Image (cartoon, rainbow, N blue to C red):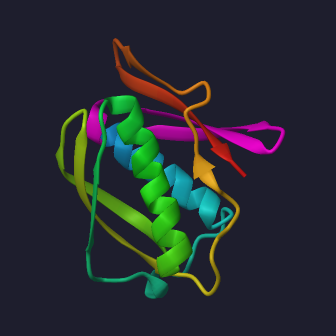
């Protein structure tokens, strides 16, 4: 079962996420970040896009891919005024991700999160799947 939660730090928030597999972990991390960007307010279902948007990220290892994936979502939210609400991973390895998402337009950049960071970053293999912690600079 996939899940996420937040742990507060001074000027930072730790996103702690878990899932049964790597695609699930990436999707759940993206959804956790989206929840934070929307400040926990769920938009009306009628506000959501019906069209899928492609998202693609490459990096040099799985930890970097996780950070780059979250930073891509922050970038799209800031520049495109759009936050994903539903994420499907189409193709993934430890260094490349192709996904598609449906989301919601926002009126102003959701500037709560500046970036995902590498500070204290980890992705762990567990008997029941994976978990990860990523510190978000706020």
Specify the farthest residue to the top.
127
Question: x, y (%) of residue 121?
Answer: 54, 27
* Total tally of numbered discs in the picture: 0
* Quadrant of the snapshot with the N terminus: top left
Residue at figure coordinates x 63%, y 44% from the top left: 136
The residue lying furthest to the right in this view is 10
* Residue at 43% from the left image edge and 81% from the top image edge: 48
Residue, far left:
91
Q: Quadrant of residue 64?
A: top left
18 or 74, which lies in front?
Answer: 74
Instruction: Point out the stretch of residues depicted in magenta.
Output: 1-23
Residue 45: % across, % down:
46, 80
x 25%, y 58%: residue: 99
Examine the rendered structure and indicate whether residue 108 appears above or below residue 28. Answer: below
Residue 19 appearing in the image: no
Choose between 65 and 38: the one closer to the eye.
65
């Amino acid at each position: 079962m996939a899940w996420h939660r937040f742990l507060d730090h001074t000027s930072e928030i730790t996103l702690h996420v878990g899932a049964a597999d790597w695609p699930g972990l990436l999707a759940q991390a993206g959804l956790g970040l989206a929840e934070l960007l929307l400040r926990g307010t769920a938009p009306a279902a009628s506000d959501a896009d019906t069209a899928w948007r492609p998202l693609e990220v490459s990096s040099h290892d799985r930890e970097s891919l996780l950070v780059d994936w979250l930073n891509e979502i922050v970038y799209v939210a800031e520049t495109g005024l759009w936050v994903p609400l539903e994420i499907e991973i189409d193709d993934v390895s430890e260094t490349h991700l192709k996904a598609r998402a449906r989301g919601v337009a926002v009126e102003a950049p959701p500037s709560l999160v500046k970036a995902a960071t590498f500070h204290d970053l980890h992705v762990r293999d567990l008997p029941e799947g994976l978990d990860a912690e990523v510190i978000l600079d706020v």
